Image (spheres, rainbow, N blue to C red):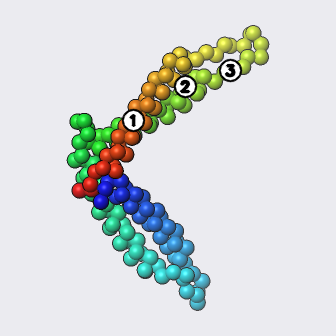
Amino acid sequence: MKLATALSNRADLQGRINEIERRLIANSKIQEGEEPSENPIELIAEKDRMLAEVENLIIKINLTNSRVDCNGLTVTEMLAKRDCLKQDIAIMRNFLNSANDKVNRYSKSEIVIKSTVNVAEYRKRVDELCKELRELDEKIQEINWTTELI
């Protein structure tokens, strides 16, 4: 099984587990004298089976990610870098949007508000980070589709 398939299966299972949780809650109480629409005991057994399957997939995915090397980095390291790049980009975009906001003055006696940084210069840096993120994400996707799960 390819790593990408395992990741897809994990996401599918996690969605199904969330659905079982909703079904369990919906069948957690009934009016006296009535029957639940689904048997909670069966739902719990199904949830336990799926969680064991997800746990097994996560272990295999993490082992694979920690062992696959790409240009001196493991996939685990690449994923950490991708997460940090995403956070950096989001922070910088929010900062630059705030720095770029114009403050209207209604008279010449009001205080002048100016940006603390050269917004255009930092936007170029953010664009470079976005390019780095895209390239890294493409490499991770390529690895996911070409790597066999351990």
Dot 2 falls on a residue whose secondary structure is: helix
Q: Quadrant of the N terminus?
A: bottom left
- Quadrant location of residue 87? top left
Q: Residue 96 carries which label?
A: 2
Residue situated in front as seen by the camera: 145 or 22: 145
Query: Would you say the residues marked 2 and 1 are in contact, meaning their CB atoms lie under 8 Å apart?
Result: no
Q: Residue 85 location in percent, x, y?
A: 41, 34
Eye-nearest disc, 2 or 3:
2
Residue 80 visible in image:
no
Q: Can residue 73 be seen in this view?
A: yes
Residue that label 1 marks: 135
Q: In which quarter of the image is residue 26?
A: bottom right
SS state under label 3: loop
Q: Which of marks 2 and 1 is nearer the N terminus?
A: 2
- Measured in 3D between alpha carbons, the distance from the residue under mark 2 to the one under mark 1, in whole angstroms, is 23 Å
Q: Distance between the residues labelled 2 and 3?
A: 14 Å
| The one of 81 and 36 positioned closer to us in this rendering | 81
- Residue 101 in picture, x, y percent from top left: 63, 24
**56 lies left or right of 31:** left
Kindly identify which residue carries mark 3: 103
Residue displayed at 24% across by 52% down: 63
- Give the mark nearest the N terminus, 2 or 3: 2
Q: Judge depth for marks 1 and 3 and give the one in front.
A: 1
Amino acid type at image mark 2: Leu
State the SS at label 1. helix
Real-space CA distance between mark 1 and mark 3, rounded to the nearest whole angstrom: 37 Å
Residue under the image location 55 percent in, 25 percent down: 96
Q: Quadrant of the C terminus?
A: bottom left
Q: Which of marks 1 and 3 is nearer the N terminus?
A: 3
Q: In this view, does 133 lie above or below 113?
A: below
